[in-house]
Image: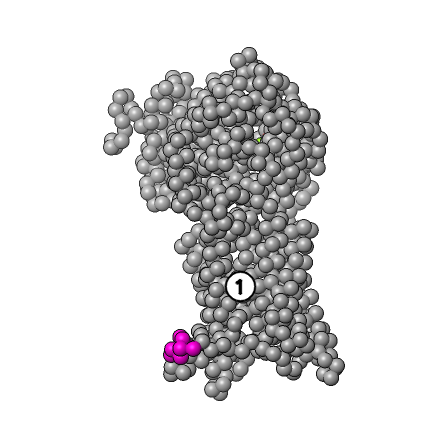
Amino acid sequence: MIELLTSLLAITLRSGTSLIYATIGEIYTERSGVLNLGIEGMMLMSAVTSFAVVYHTGSLLLAILTAMAVGGLLASVHAFLSITMRANQVVSGLSITLFGAGMASFLGQRLGPETNSGYLVGLVGAKFEPLNIPVLSRIPVVGALFNQDILTYIVYLVLPLAWYYLYKTRNGLNLRAVGENPQTADAMGINVGKVRYIYTIIGGMLVGIGGAHLSLSYAPGWTENITGGRGWIVIALVIFSMWNPARAIWGALLFGGINAVQFRLQASGTNIPASYLNMLPYLATVVVLVMLTWWEALSKRVGAPSSLAKSYMREDK
Amino acid sequence: MSHPILEMKGITKRFPNVVANDRVDLELYPGEVLALLGENGAGKSSLMNVVAGLYRADEGEIFIRGKRVEINSPRDSMNLGVGMVHQNFMLVDTMTVAENIILGLPDIPFRVDMEKVNERIRELSEKYNLQVDPESYIWQLSVGEQQRVEILKLIYRGAEILILDEPTAVLTPQESKELNRVLQQMTSEGKSAVFITHKMEEVMAFSNWVRVLNKGRLVTVKETQKTNPKELAQLMVGRDVLFRLAKKERQTGDVILDLKDVQALDDKGLPALQSISLQIRAGEIMGVAGVAGNGQKQLVEVLTGLRKITGGQIRIFGEEMANKNPLEIINCGVSHIPADRIARGVAGDMSVAGNLAMKCYRKPPLVKRGILHPRRIIDLAKRMIDMFRIDTPTPQTHAKFLSGGNIQKIILAREIDACGGVLIAAYPSRGLDVGATEYIRSQMIEQSECGTAILLISEDLEELMTVADKIMVLYEGRIMDILASSEANTEQIGLLMAGVTEGKTAVGHA
Ligand SMILES: Nc1ncnc2c1ncn2[C@@H]1O[C@H](COP(=O)(O)OP(=O)(O)O)[C@@H](O)[C@H]1O
Ligand SMILES: [Mg+2]
């Protein structure tokens, strides 16, 4: 039993890590008032490019940096379209997802070695191995927390830091004001456009790490549609966490947990058709999401940043 | 004479359809107050937004402390010691008072020490007698308290040149007095202020200079002592303004609106209206006086179907209308001019025509078999725009681009046009210039002459005395008394508003 729980928690964390990175990234982006629906495409692009880099160079660090650069680059396209050009943010984000998905699939057939006729599928490269923390990792069940790869350990730090930065620092205060009421932020001397660019791009970099975690750790290698719709789950998790980075962990663990249980069930050979089991995490996320946000909206004055997805121009009325 | 601390020369500001400022000059001297007057849409806010760095002037120069300056952003403006209270509050609702005050400040530490900030704010609010809890959230505050936060922002930043854009328009008389006192305290410390207002008493009471704008042009510069309200109003509007309106003697008819023992709760579930009984006859204007927050809002809401009553009866044209929905009440002939006209009065992103048709679009000829007739809507709108002299480039212009007075005229036009005998008007002249105010008041009198029963809520006793036939005073959700306006005087009403009846206080009675 203990062994079962330990392994469930381990899988939960492993599948939750990429979600947490991407969710925090998107929370920061949305807090500045920019809605980026390009996450799915950005995660796919960073997954494929980081795997290609690791395959050819063997450097995991270089791969992660590539993923961040790719995520940041796609996010800056979105920033340019939605902040400078004032395009509709939903349309711009969706185009990035469509572009990213198509481009990732294309690159998956070109970035591989000649011996594999350019394909990346089926290749094996370096990956993030679990790092065993002595003593701590031998605690029953909880030990699973300390038998993870480095990206997961970093997430343990990123979560509280992201929360602290948003709620306790000057920059976080300004960021929240920009997403909530850009007119006021501007009148108070905050450069609204600059703040929005910065956090859209930082958000994109974090999403990039989320994508890289899939192809470098969770499911090492490149497979078509490696994200399996995680980019969309992230959108839901952002709402679920009420735009609070500290709460990103609960949604990610819930999704990761159901995913882990579902794996177990499949492995133990139940006669529930696999497609139903695969549906489970998505279904559960949606149900819990609806229930929780409904309850939250009733009980507190928290919610989406008021100017989410609205462009701002100084002399507009 | 000393040199101006702020000087603007030949400022021109153009927007796509209008020239908001046309070669305007302005001088502000240290330690003085300059009153900036003009009708709604005259370009006062635009001119001041140029100094605040929110608008870029197309032409002209700005000098501060004698030096030519370039103001490209609010940051530049702040660094020059300019602080502005904007016409619409610039506050983030979901943040605390303290967070709002330090927002955007470059010289606070990266890790904000909120305790220290709170302490400093408490000190300042003590010094200027501006009571507000630094830890409460903006959404928890009343309008008056929010205005205090705006002032505290200027003080905290140590602004030397204060710009106040109609800061008292949304305040009760008491709150306005308090704000004026703070402003005087600040100027006595050597700060200078540009003060925009429509209230002549304020202009006369503490400004040193007056500048009047009309359609974007500077028309007058005067020393306050050498002018008077009548002259200023005339300069603003470009014609004589009647502060006293002629009211014909008229016959009142049957009882149209009849409230018996009406009771209702406020949003917190506390009693807001307690046994309200009143009758308004056809052709009668009933004024409602009272300090804000004594049940006016709830009274309007129960009469328009926006709030349930917990006891009593509401009869309109003899029919029981208590707790009916707004549409049923509209169909019964009730029109409503809401207090918050931006939130409840117009749809800003809809055209002027759409807003004008918003009440009668369900009926022919505007609709036929469920399909709207855009041409007929435009025709109707054109007629109403003419009749009510609404100043709009086209009927298709979005309502939000109009000035406050013209937005109010849209609502008035729509509500009067669709009025079936009852008009509920909440603060209809709030924030309007003298010309628009006069117009709205005369429209209400005209309507009552046609037999409409009108309930007029106002914080302006002068308005109640001139427009209403009877004045009822609300205090803590009760009617203190109903007086004939021809026999009432402001002192008497003022006492009733404070809950005093003939020497004894009303608290505990009933
Ligand atoms: N941001 C803007 N965009 C377009 N038109 C504007 C804007 N701000 C003001 N205007 C127009 O400029 C004119 C002057 O407006 P404003 O300065 O607000 O007048 P006031 O403050 O005197 O009432 C009005 O016609 C108004 O509609
Ligand atoms: Mg104005």
The residue lying at 47 percent from left, 25 percent from top is: B189
Along the horizontal axis of the image, is B118 left or right of B29? left
The spot of residue B96 in percent (x, y) is 44, 45
Tell whether position B47 is magenta.
Answer: no
Location of residue B494 (image quadrant): top left
The spot of residue B426 in percent (x, y) is 47, 33
Q: Is residue B448 visible?
A: yes
Disc 1 residue crowd, few under 14, some 14–19, many 20+, Cα 10 Å: many
The residue lying at 52 percent from left, 32 percent from top is: B159
* Residue of label 1: A23
Quadrant containing ligand 2 reads: top right
Who is closer to the viewer here, B250 or A238? A238
Specify the segment rendered in magenta: A134-142
Q: Is residue B449 visible?
A: no
The residue lying at 54 percent from left, 57 percent from top is: A28
Residue lying at the far top of the rendered structure: B226
The residue lying at 44 percent from left, 51 percent from top is: A301
The spot of residue A97 in percent (x, y) is 65, 65
Q: Quick one: SS at disc 1?
A: helix
Q: Chain of mark 1?
A: A
**Quadrant of the frame with the N terminus of chain B:** top right
**Scheme of image coloration:** one colour
Name above or below for residue A9 compared with residue B256: below
- Kind of residue at badge 1: Thr
Name above or below for residue B400 compared with residue B8: below
Tell whether position A140 is magenta.
Answer: yes
The spot of residue B461 in percent (x, y) is 43, 23
